[in-house]
Amino acid sequence: MSVSIFKDFFGNRYYFLFSFVLGIPVWIANLTYVNSLNISEPETVATGLTICFFMGVFAGRYLGRAWVAHSDKSPRVLIIGLSLLMVVCISWLIFHVDSPRRNQGTTNLFLYAVPFIIISLATGMTVKLIRSITQKQLMEARTAAAQSKGELQLLQSQLSPHFLFNTLNNLYGLSITQHEKIPPLLLRLSELLRYSVYEAGETYVPLNMELDYINNYIEFEKIRMGNRLVLTTEIQTPSTNDIKIAPMLLIVFVENAFKYAGNTAAKQSFIDIKLAIERDLIVFRVSNSYSKEKVERKLRGKNSGMGLVNVYKRLELLYPAEHILEIQEEEEKYTITLQLKTRK
């Protein structure tokens, strides 16, 4: 029990080493002042003052720790008060050392020692309180980071099931009306699932890999939709793998474009996909034919819109203040424009 109290009061052994090193200039300053008072045995008095100073620092540290442990209030006001107290005491010491009372050595020593020890107590307490605030902020930041990481992992775990659910629905419809398209679609689907299962778990992947995935998905949908689709793409492919992006972020917009375009009543539907890299930005734009009435009817389903909600949350977590998402909804045209800061 006594060992625990000793450790609580003095801290670890490095504090002793730091006190010893810092004690040398403090002792010299005390000795200089005591010599000016013509007091006998100045070295002993200076040593006593130095020991009292560091005992005051440790005592202040202990009091600060006790205050944090037993008070729910923020220590900021107390820190300000202690800082003002130190300023007052230091100002007094400067004044007193310059203008000591004549022939009153003991009184001068007392007027020096009291504010000197008050400064040591306030210093120890202030340092401990500031450290407690820093540790609390660090703990809160770590907790927030852990929560964000957990939320991100949950969002990413939803990507593959969501994609597979939509794709199997499409395959089921084709198996009834156009079953000859199923074999090549299954082959494309296996490539898509390989990426979504093995690569999408990373926080960021090379943009080239994401674009390969998007191109595979486009080929998959071209087989499914056939001649009814008028598709134009203008995708700038990076020359290296240095540029990275969150996996399966863009595909949700592409998937929605095919879904909306396929739900129009027109004989032909269009999709226009563009991606450009401008300095440190990825600019992605998707336009597609759109039937507002049909989409609103379909979006009343239970699972509608989950992919977009997922994307919005991931953008906030992975690209805070580093993305611009614009959506333009017209009667027969739907356009999204996304700007992202690149990752390297």
Image (cartoon, grey):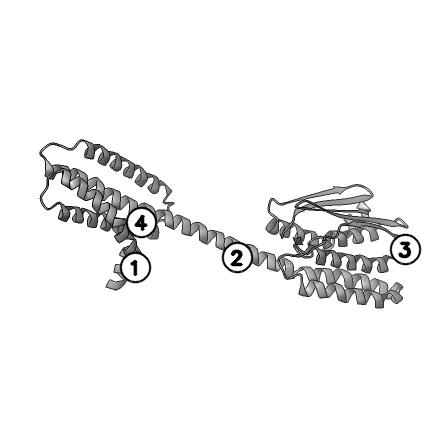
Identity of the amino acid at label 3? Answer: Asn
Task: Assess disc 4: are there few (<14), some (14-19) or many (≥20) residues with their C-alpha within 10 Å of its C-alpha.
Answer: many
Residue 199 in view of the camera: yes
Residue type for callout 2:
Ala
Residues at marks 4 and 1, CA–CA distance in whole angstroms: 19 Å
| Label whose residue precedes the other's in the sequence (4 or 1) | 1
Q: Quadrant of the N terminus?
A: bottom left
- Comparing 344 with 122, the one in front is 344
Q: CA distance from mark 3 to mark 2?
A: 48 Å
For the residues bearing labels 1 and 2, Cβ distance under 8 angstroms: no
- The kind of residue tagged 4 is Gly
The x and y percentages for residue 112 are 18, 39
> Residue tagged by mark 3?
227
Q: Which residue position is annotated with label 2?
A: 146
Q: Is residue 322 left or right of residue 30?
A: right
User: In the image, what residue occupies the spot 17% across and 46% down?
Assistant: 46
Q: Earlier in the sequence, mark 3 or mark 2?
A: 2
x, y percent for residue 107? 12, 37
Of circles 1 and 2, the one toward us is 1
Q: Which residue is mark 1?
A: 13
On screen, residue 244 versus residue 275, left or right, reads left
SS of the residue at dot 2?
helix
Say which of 55 and 44 sits in front.
44
